[in-house]
């Protein structure tokens, strides 16, 4: 199987680390605070903890950080990320207003991260799966759909395969421009969870063919 | 119960006419071609057919037309629509490229229709429910969610009530700005149906609380 480095140690980092573990991938979790990274690998019983700046071991690198931090780290780690598959999971919501995104309406967080790390193969994934939903791995009685968008076919395929190997349903959502729609979907899903239309361990289930 | 006028006689018009019938609403179906309107009411066994330009009888008027036609009709019928609840169901997809919407990225079809008929209370609804899914009324074993967005609280409430009365699940999706996210969701759902990630009688099911 593949190898996965996760940058971050929050709820989404932990959930995606669980996906990597379930897929049988080699797992590294790095964080600014190495104690936090160690907490994730200890709780999970899998993976090697590290500090941001440690050499990345993963073929797939997941930026499990809020949007502004993800862009900053992508720029700082630009050389380390060159040639790798980089997964952007962010929902760049304006949390001050909860009424818009902070990225330009004709762009996306994924495009911003691709710009910060131009030699990386950036894909959007895990942005429409709430942490609790992803930890459970099912939604509405079926394997949870993980929508994957990006311009590099091989990178998209690798993340779809990772999701499938973990018992989820990897779904090809098309090119990097579709990140815009995935971010809209993620934002909408958050507003609906906040207003009671769904729950923070629910969301949108993509009904399979 | 309320009264509903549907402008249009295609698949979505028929499906929404079925919703109005199931909700026990007074139903009028009008089309440029009155034969088409009559076909819908005859097949459904409910409703009064009419020609575009006939007086509208519905408190709720559904523009069940493609985006460009919906905008055109909203402008032409501006006076007739004043004060009424107008439902925009469109997904303004660029069908030449199937890679973007035709509305500006910082706007929406709903905003364009509101601009064409400024005295109407415009809401977005039924844009994320494929016709076949809507005709069935369930998705993933639960009543189908009908996401409703718009700035007029009463208008949003009336369309939510209509959906609920028909046995569907009306969901408040917030203000008119959310139409942008609903259009992104609708577009994404279409690309996923086209690529096999879902089916044209499937789509995204919003898991309820």
Image (cartoon, coloured by chain):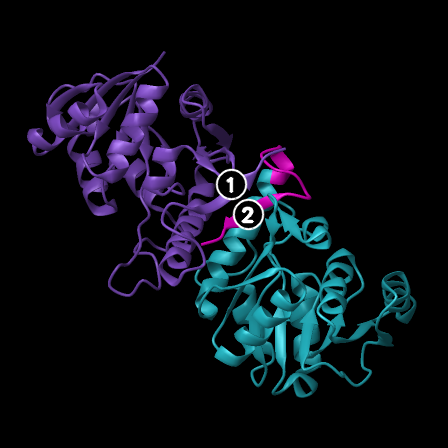
Chain colours: A purple, B cyan
Which residue was labeled with disc 2? B205
The kind of secondary structure element at disc 2 is strand
Q: Which one is in front, B123 or B51?
A: B123
Asked whether residue A209 is drawn in magenta, I would say no
Packing grade of label 1 (10 A; few <14, some 14-19, many >=20) is many
Q: Position of residue A162 (x, y in %)?
A: 40, 21
Chain letter, disc 1 residue? A
Asked where in the image residue B115 lies, by quadrant, the reply is bottom right
Q: Quadrant of the N terminus of chain A?
A: top left
Residue A172 shows in this picture? yes
**Dot 2, crowdedness within 10 Å: few (<14), some or many (≥20)?**
many
Q: Chain of mark 2?
A: B
Above or below B132: residue B19:
below
Question: Which numbered dot is residue B166?
Answer: none
Q: Is residue B32 above or below residue B133?
A: below
Is label 1 in contact with label 2 (beta carbons under 8 Å)?
yes
Q: Foreground: A107 or B133?
A: B133
Q: Which residues are magenta?
A: B193-209
- Image x and y of residue B167, in percent: 65, 61
Query: Looking at the rendering, which quadrant does residue B39 occupy?
Result: bottom right
Q: Is residue A90 left or right of residue B75?
A: left
Which type of secondary structure does the marked residue at label 1 adopt?
A: loop
Residue B79 in which image quadrant: bottom right
């Amino acid at each position: 199987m593949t190898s996965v480095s996760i940058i971050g140690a929050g709820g989404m980092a932990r959930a995606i680390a669980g996906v990597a573990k379930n897929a049988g991938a080699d797992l590294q979790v790095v964080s600014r605070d190495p104690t936090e990274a160690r907490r994730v690998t200890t709780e999970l019983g899998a993976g090697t903890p590290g500090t941001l700046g440690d050499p990345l071991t993963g073929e797939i690198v997941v930026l499990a950080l809020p949007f502004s931090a993800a862009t900053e780290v992508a720029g700082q780690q630009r050389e380390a990320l060159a040639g790798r598959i980089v997964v952007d999971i962010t929902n760049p919501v304006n949390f001050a207003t909860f009424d818009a995104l902070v990225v330009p309406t004709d762009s996306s967080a994924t495009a911003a991260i691709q710009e910060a790390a131009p030699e990386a193969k950036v894909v959007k994934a895990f942005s429409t799966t709430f942490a609790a939903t992803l930890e459970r791995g099912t939604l509405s009685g079926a394997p949870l759909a993980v929508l994957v968008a990006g311009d590099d076919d091989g990178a998209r395929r690798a993340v779809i395969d990772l999701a499938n190997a973990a018992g989820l349903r990897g779904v090809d959502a098309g090119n990097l421009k579709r990140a815009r729609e995935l971010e809209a979907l993620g934002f909408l899903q958050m507003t609906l969870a906040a207003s009671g239309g769904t729950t923070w361990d629910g969301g949108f289930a993509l009904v399979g063919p």
